[in-house]
Image: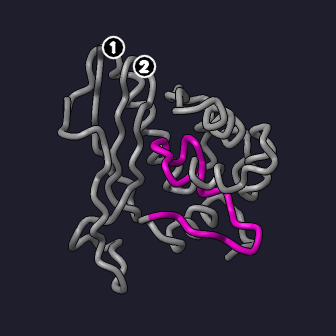
Amino acid sequence: MAVTQVAYEAEGWGVGELVVENGRVVWHELPWPQPGDAAETPSRTPTHPGHGAGAVVSAEPSRRSRGLVAEVVRLLQAYFAGEAVRLDDVPVDLEYSSPFHDRCATALRGVPRGEVVTYGELAALAGAPRAARAAGTFCAHSHLAIFVPCHRVVAADGLGSYGSYGVDYKRRLLALEGYRDAL
């Protein structure tokens, strides 16, 4: 099993975490300002813990995954710099806990940059139109932020939340992608 866990810096966003196993992204933690970082917001001191797979398995990518890890980090840095890069081609672990969650992940990867869907619409895209709350639960437990873009899912009556990152982070991601309606 080839596992690589790396931290990467996204200018103006902070430090993120990426875990690649056997040629697929299995975990992605969004960049978060570090204490004392210029990107740190004065109204909230970041206390967001890394949720990753645990201790760093390897700071250096294995030979097998070196190219993929370097390419994914490059894509992430370009994404957070505002470039319209494609992330839906990056191989990710879409084996979720249920077939519904698998379908949510697949459907959400198809929502284009700059567009949003409601939780109810995501549920319908995943084949369960009455399962908006279940779609919300899927988003709340996502471990592949940006690759499975849960920030593109909004509440029927507004922007909705974004877990421990907060609504301002979600708003910032949507603005980065050119979505302005909920801002």
**Magenta segment includes 153:** yes
Name the element at disc 2: loop
* Pointer 1 residue: 64
The picture quadrant where one finds residue 57 is top left
Name the element at disc 1: loop
Question: What's the magenta bit mostly, secondary-structure-wise?
Answer: loop
Q: Amino acid at mark 2?
A: Gly
Q: Is residue 176 left or right of residue 61?
A: right
Report whether residue 115 is seen: no
Q: Nearer the viewer, residue 134 or 3?
A: 134
Image mark count: 2
Q: Quadrant of the C terminus?
A: bottom right
The picture quadrant where one finds residue 173 is bottom right
Q: Position of residue 134 (x, y in %)?
A: 64, 50
- Residue drawn at x 45%, y 24% is 24
- Residue drawn at x 29%, y 14% is 1
* Pointer 2 residue: 23
- 115 to 94, vertically: above or below: below
Which of the colour schemes (rainbow, by chain, secondary structure, one colour) is used?
Answer: one colour
Q: Amino acid at mark 1?
A: Arg
Q: Is residue 1 left or right of residue 183?
A: left
The residue mark sitting in front, 1 or 2, is 2
**Magenta segment includes 154:** yes
Q: Position of residue 100 (x, y in %)?
A: 66, 35
Segment tinted magenta in the rendering: 139-163
Q: CA distance from mark 1 to mark 2?
A: 8 Å
Asked if the residue at tag 2 contacts the one at tag 1, i.e. Cβ–Cβ closer than 8 Å, the answer is yes
